[in-house]
Image: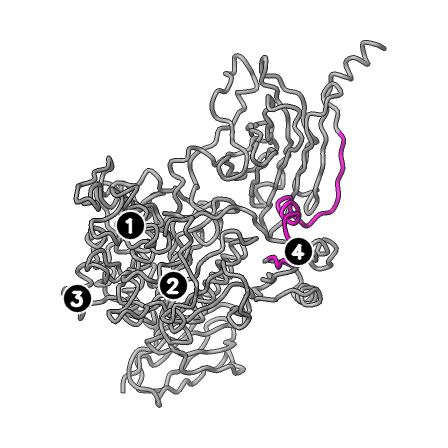
């Protein structure tokens, strides 16, 4: 009996608690840091009418809906009540840390012939009548590169999300935070805006590449120097930050539509955690905005984590054997913490557990938490307390959420017995998943060095190592509708402020060592294209320029008004500028036309290798080729009919017959070549009869038809009016 008792005491002991919980571990932790009245942005999935009623009843703001998703904000004190709300299926919230993603450039990307109007272009294109929107750290309003020749600002709208709601009429609605300023306010110098100093003028540098006009010294103009500028200064400390980016995109496109101009949004920022599949709510709302009207495009930086080592974990789970990977305690977070994502079809059969391994004096396994399956524990938080020989090894919290057809799983180990333990994530039963975890990002480091060999520790035959694949940033970057940009080296020398040549050890034209790698989690192609980024001279924040002249003169251009920067942050606005030039020629182009024109005319060279690739995408952007390729017409009964619509005759002298090939038409909108809405119809269209659309009152030219079908499909086509 005594021997039996001794044997039992050597086994790990497990205490278990389990409860329904719609709030993730992340959200529960963050709620403790919010003031009760602070509004927190959320995406709620479920029965819309119930969700809207709850939000409005509890002092919240409704910002928009998309299918079964509600974009809203709620006072922090009300959020815990969501756990009992009938009709709520999933709360989407992320506390991940957003990152800013940081001449010769015009030549490298073949922009100069476009600025000169070289044949066969009919004229020079410089971004006239196009809006370039930037969501970034802000802009140096006093920099001449962002001013007209008379000294007035080129910034037509500024939404500073970092400013408090001190002036109520300046709080943009329906968003409910920050302060909005127009060009008149900026010219009067009353905005109080500054490019956020802690980011060293990142936003100004990005805008300089995409839309700077070179007015300061006649040098370092951007790709679309005549474009109007809209700046959103992002609040990187805003809870659920990605929701503010979706708000900012909506703000830019709404301003552009009111002015009847096409718009390009540049996103040189992002975060590295999430599902990496473009199915998060922020991306779905962004996709909807792109589909809503022609003359819209979004361009985003792929990310700069290419040299951060291996922090992505993914593998095919064996059906019989048990595989595992160790995670380290993160002293900054005071926990072991990581998150993984999986499609339900790939994880329904998977069993997983958390285990503890002691590393000294020799590696030894001390026990598992309970083995779990996602299917049996959705919307629950499970708390396991693991003991060994009466010593508590740690408390393991596991939360499993179901977002549509994807599982989100968060694991946290608190109060670990000793930092001499490693914590294993073990799997069996078949399937696959993806996990991104890295200590500098606030999560646990995946153990990949100083590992015992299988001879010393036999379990190592089943150990799975991380890799450096799929390291692009999350969210909109993973959307098929967004143009995602990788980064190659722009130059390796320049004349600095002291009049001396600065030389760095990199190869112009080669991919940057920092450039993140695709593809998406679900293995779609990303990035789409590459542009020059590393070692680009561009406009900067004046206070930072003055400081760097004293302490880092080798990083400042000889003119004292521009400095060196790099990364996909500066590659992205190159491509955004090219999209702006494309809209200068065809303001009614769709996002798909712009994207196809860019990737179909990409340049391959000695550096790009086999294309498409996971860093260069389809190749290097070529602005001149993008604008000189014959425009593709996608409309008409034969060559001119879309996939969903039959249109005849087309071209026409004024009257067009339109008939759906599949579902009944719900509404019709007609836009002119500048993207202005000129006609709208919302009748009960029959699928059996063609609808007569009369454009006789309008002048000859190209028009864009956008039709929403009953099924929700948006079908677009061009109408050629010839009188």
Q: Position of residue 394 (x, y in %)?
A: 68, 29
Name the disc covering residue 133, or none: 2
In what element is the residue under mark 4? helix
* Disc 4 to disc 2, C-alpha distance: 31 Å
CB within 8 Å, label 4 to label 3: no
Residue 71 picture quarter: bottom right
CB within 8 Å, label 4 to label 2: no
Observer-side mark, 4 or 3, equals 4
Name the disc covering residue 548, or none: none
Region in magenta? 15-40
Q: Residue at x 59, y 45 (%)?
A: 408
Residue at image mark 1 = 531
Residue at image mark 4 = 76
In what element is the residue under mark 2? strand
Which residue occupies the extreme right position in the image? 1
Residue at image mark 3 = 117
10 Å crowding of disc 4: few (<14), some (14-19), many (20+) = many
Q: Quadrant of the N terminus?
A: top right
* Disc 1 to disc 2, C-alpha distance: 19 Å
CB within 8 Å, label 1 to label 2: no
Observer-side mark, 4 or 2, equals 4
């Amino acid at each position: 009996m005594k021997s039996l008792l001794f044997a039992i005491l050597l086994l790990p002991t497990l205490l278990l608690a389990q409860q329904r919980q719609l709030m993730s571990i992340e959200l529960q932790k963050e709620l403790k840091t919010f003031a009760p009245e602070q509004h927190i942005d959320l995406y709620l999935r479920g029965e819309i009418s119930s969700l809207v009623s709850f939000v409005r009843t509890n002092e919240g703001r409704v910002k928009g809906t998309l299918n079964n998703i509600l974009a809203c904000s709620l006072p922090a004190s009300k959020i815990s009540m969501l756990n009992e709300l009938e009709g709520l299926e999933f709360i989407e919230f992320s506390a991940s840390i957003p990152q800013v993603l940081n001449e010769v450039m015009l030549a490298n990307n073949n922009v100069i012939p476009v600025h000169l109007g070289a044949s066969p272009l009919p004229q020079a294109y410089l971004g006239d009548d196009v809006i370039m929107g930037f969501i970034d750290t802000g802009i140096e309003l006093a920099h001449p590169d962002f001013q007209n020749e008379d000294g007035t600002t080129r910034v037509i709208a500024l939404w500073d999300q970092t400013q408090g709601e001190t002036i109520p009429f300046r709080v943009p609605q329906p968003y409910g935070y920050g302060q909005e300023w127009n060009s008149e306010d900026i010219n009067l110098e009353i905005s109080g805006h500054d490019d956020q100093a802690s980011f060293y003028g990142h936003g100004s540098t990005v805008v300089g590449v995409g839309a700077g006009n070179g007015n300061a010294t006649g040098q370092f103009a951007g790709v679309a120097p005549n474009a109007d500028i809209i700046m959103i200064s992002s609040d990187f400390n805003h809870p659920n930050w990605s929701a503010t980016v979706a708000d900012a995109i909506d703000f830019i496109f709404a301003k552009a539509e009111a002015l009847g101009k096409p718009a390009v949004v540049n996103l040189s920022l992002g975060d590295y955690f999430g599902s990496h599949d473009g199915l998060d709510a922020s991306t779905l709302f962004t996709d909807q905005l792109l589909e809503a009207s022609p003359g819209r495009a979004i361009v985003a930086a792929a990310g700069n984590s290419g040299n951060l080592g291996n922090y992505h974990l993914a593998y095919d789970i064996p059906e019989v054997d048990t595989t595992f990977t160790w995670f380290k305690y993160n002293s900054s977070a005071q926990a072991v913490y990581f998150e993984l994502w999986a499609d339900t079809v790939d994880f329904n059969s998977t069993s997983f557990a958390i285990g503890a391994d002691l590393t000294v004096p020799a590696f030894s396994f001390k026990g598992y938490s309970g083995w779990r399956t996602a299917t049996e524990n959705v919307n629950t938080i499970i708390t396991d307390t693991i003991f060994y020989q009466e010593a508590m090894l740690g408390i393991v919290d596991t939360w499993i959420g179901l977002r549509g057809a994807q599982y989100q799983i968060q694991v946290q180990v608190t109060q670990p017995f000793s930092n001499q333990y490693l914590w294993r994530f073990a799997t069996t039963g078949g399937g696959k998943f993806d996990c991104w975890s890295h200590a500098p990002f606030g999560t646990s480091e995946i153990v990949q060095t100083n590992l015992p060999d299988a001879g010393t520790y036999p379990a190592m035959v089943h150990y799975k190592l991380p890799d450096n694949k799929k390291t692009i940033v999350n969210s909109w970057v993973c959307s098929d509708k967004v143009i995602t940009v990788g980064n190659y080296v722009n130059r390796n020398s320049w004349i600095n402020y002291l009049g001396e040549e600065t030389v760095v050890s990199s190869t112009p034209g080669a991919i940057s060592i920092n450039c993140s790698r695709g593809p998406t989690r679900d293995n779609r192609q990303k990035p789409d294209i590459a542009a020059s980024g590393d070692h680009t001279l561009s406009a900067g924040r004046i206070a930072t320029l003055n400081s760097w002249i004293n302490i880092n003169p080798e990083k400042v251009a000889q003119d004292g008004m521009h400095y060196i920067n790099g990364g996909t942050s500066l590659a992205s606005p190159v491509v955004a500028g090219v999209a702006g030039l494309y809209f200068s020629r065809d303001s009614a182009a769709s996002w798909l036309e712009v994207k196809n024109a860019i990737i179909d005319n990409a340049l391959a060279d000695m550096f790009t290798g086999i294309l498409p690739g996971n860093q260069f995408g389809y190749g290097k952007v070529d602005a001149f080729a993008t604008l000189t390729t014959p425009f593709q017409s996608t409309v008409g009964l034969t060559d001119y009919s879309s996939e969903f619509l039959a249109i005849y005759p087309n071209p026409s002298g004024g009257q067009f017959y339109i008939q759906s090939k599949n579902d009944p038409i719900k509404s019709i909108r007609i836009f002119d070549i500048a993207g202005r809405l000129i006609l709208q119809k919302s009748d009960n269209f029959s699928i059996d009869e063609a609808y007569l659309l009369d454009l006789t009152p309008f002048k000859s030219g190209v028009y864009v038809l956008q039709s929403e079908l009953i099924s929700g499909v948006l079908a677009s086509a061009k109408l050629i009016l010839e009188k």
